[in-house]
Each structure stands twice: as structure tokens, then as C-alpha cells.
Image: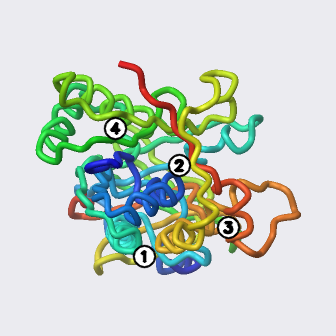
Amino acid sequence: MEKHVVVIYPHPDDESFGAAGTIAKFRDQGVPVTYLCGTLGEMGRNMGNPTFANRETLPEIRKQELINACNVLDMELRMLGYRDKTLEYEDRNEVAQHIKGILEELEPSLVITHYPEHAVHPDHNALGAAAIEAVRLIDEEKRPTVWAQAITNTQLEDLGVPQIINDVRDNFDKKMEAILCHQSQANGVIRSWNQSDDLSNDLKEEAMKRLSIESFYIWKF
Amino acid sequence: MKPIDITKVQEKLESFVGKEVYIHLETTNGAYASHVNEKAYNVGVYIRNAKVRFNQAKIVGDGKSYRAGLKMEIGWIYAEGLTDWELFENEKLLMAGHDREGRLMVALQISETPFHY
């Protein structure tokens, strides 16, 4: 059993879309989970549908949505304080040192983050790379395992079959509850996946099609 | 935000003329544009808290979509595709263009005090 799991993603909602089922399983087993959330998603395009946020109110709204989702998933939250869309321009080593300090305090047995260069959004790639660098800097005997999540459409061709494949249909209700905490984002994000006209009005049904498997590659140091 | 009222926005724009103001200007089609549609391109521009002074300002449009242009001593700032506006914290002029799903595509914001950063 894991001792402590630390999830490191850049945006409020990455945890819910990407790993909520996996997080819920760890919490069911009594494993503590901490989310290090890189930014507040300040630059998101989705403003709610119908629109209820604007560029200036979005950060506080997303912060509250993030807190709500972490309550649903029963995990500790730490906000890292970077700004959305700027992570790749930060000094990689500085971000890695920042994360390393927190990991040394929490001493997790497992870190979950994005797979650098295979995670589509520049913030995903940059924070994933910094998180993996942070873990690499930890002494080998104390170093946690890293599960890296790829989200490119070509991940199977590029990286092979992921070693960790979690079917989360059993606790999909919990995952959906966490996703829907992100009121300003959930609707727009789910609808954006289906460009055709046969989009179901049932958001959960659409979400199930794409989000019922959470898979990760075990990082080789 | 609410649909642009050209008279009110023009009035507010003019209140900034000749003053040192802070600008937020952005356009984006999202970081996932080419992920969800391989024929699409990811494009975006973002500038926040640029300090400028303009001596002329005008909003133009057809009742649905608007353009706003600011003339400075040695240059221009403009934004196209604006649909909605709001006076934020009683002093910041927010203008944005949203697509049919309510997603922000473009924003031009002007304030006498800096935007939160």
C-alpha cells in the first residue's frame, strides 16, 4: 500500500479530469493524497456556459472550484502560486527546487504528474518536467515512484502501452462529482471533445466515453 | 458581462484619454485547438499591465460584434470581435468577445490602476 500520494498538475480541474478515480481509490484505502496545483487557471477560455465569469473574476472562481473538488475527493490541497500559461517560461530548476522542498516535507511513496512532451498543454509539459526533475534530485533510497500521465492522441505509438491502467468506472460518480465542481470549466471542456452534432446532452455519458480509464507510465530514472 | 452598449463604452473609453492607463490585451483559441482538431492551429497573444497613454479612442461595430481602437502618440492598439462589456470594480473597463459556447476569444481591458497579477 502507498504511504502518501502527491499529485502535481498545473490547473484546477486537471486533477478531476485526469486522476479523480485513481485518487478516490487511494482515499478508499486510507492513503493520504495531497494535490500540488500549479496555477489558478487564470487564463482559461471557458467562462461558464452560459457565461458567468470574466477574465478578472475567473481566478477566484476557479480557486473556489478547486477547493470544492478537493473536498469531494477528500485530499489535501496546496497551491503553488504560478500563473496559468507561463510555467514553461519559469526557470525549470527553480520550480523543481520549489517542488522538491514540498516533497521532502511530505515524503510521498508515489508522485503523479504529467508526462513531459506528451501532455499537450505547455503548462502540463513544463510542470511535469519540473516535478520529475524534483524527484530525480531526491536521494535514490528515499525517491518516490513517479506515474507520468500522457494525453497526446499518439501516446500508444510514441510511448507504448502504459504500465498502470486504472479502470475507474466503479467510482465514476465520484469522479463526475469532482469534475462538476469546476462549474466554469466542466461543460465547455467536455463539449469541446466532440466536434460533431451527435453530442449527447448527458455530460456524464460524454465524460464516460473518454475518462473511464486513467493510465500512467512508470517513469524510469 | 453584458452585450456591448456602444454609447456607454465610448463614454468610458473617452474618460481614459490623455491618462496613463494599464492595458490587458489577449486573444486565444485555446491550448487544445490542434489537439481536438488536427487542422487547427494554436494561436494566442497576451499582454497584461502594459502602461500606455492614448489620445483618441473609438469603438465601432454592427450591433453584435465590435472593434475598439486606441491611438497613441507613436502607435496603435486595437481589438476585433468584442461582444460583451463590464465596468469592473467601478473603474476597470472590461471588453471581451465570446464564441457561441461562451468561451473567451479576445479581450481588451483598460484601467487607471494595475490589473491583479
On the same chain, marks 2 and 4? The answer is no
Cα distance between the residues tagged 1 and 3: 29 Å
Give the amino acid type for the residue marked by disc 3 in the picture.
Glu
Alpha-carbon distance for marks 1 and 2? Answer: 24 Å
Q: Secondary structure at mark 3?
A: loop
- Identify residue for label 4: A87
Left/right placement of residue A99 relative to residue A29 reads left
Earlier in the chain: of badge 1 and badge 2, it is 1
Q: Residue furthest right?
A: A198
Who's the residue at 63% across and 55% down the image?
A211
Measure how far apart labels 2 and 4 are at the Cα level.
19 Å
Q: Which residue is mark 2?
A: B27
Q: Which amino acid type is shown beneath numbered disc 4?
A: Leu
Residue contact at pointers 4 and 1, CB within 8 angstroms:
no
Q: Residue furthest front?
A: A1
Q: Nearer the viewer, residue A21 or B107?
A: A21
**Quadrant location of the C terminus of chain A in the rendered image:** top left
Q: Position of residue B4 (x, y in %)?
A: 56, 76
Identify the secondary structure beneath mark 2.
Answer: strand
Q: Residue at x 44, y 33 (%)?
A: A125
The residue carrying pointer 4 sits among few (fewer than 14), some (14 to 19) or many (20 or more) residues within 10 Å by Cα, namely many
Q: CA distance from mark 2 to mark 3?
A: 16 Å
Kindly identify which numbered label has been placed on residue A5. none
Q: Which residue is mark 1?
A: B11
- Tell me the element at label 1: helix
- What residue is shown at x 69% (from left), y 71% (from top)? A203
Near-viewer residue (A83 or A27) = A27
- Chain ID of residue with mark 1: B
Residue A205: where, in percent of width, then height?
Answer: 74, 68
Q: Nearer the viewer, mark 1 or mark 3?
A: 3
Between disc 4 and disc 1, the foreground one is 4
Query: Dot 2 falls on which chain?
Result: B
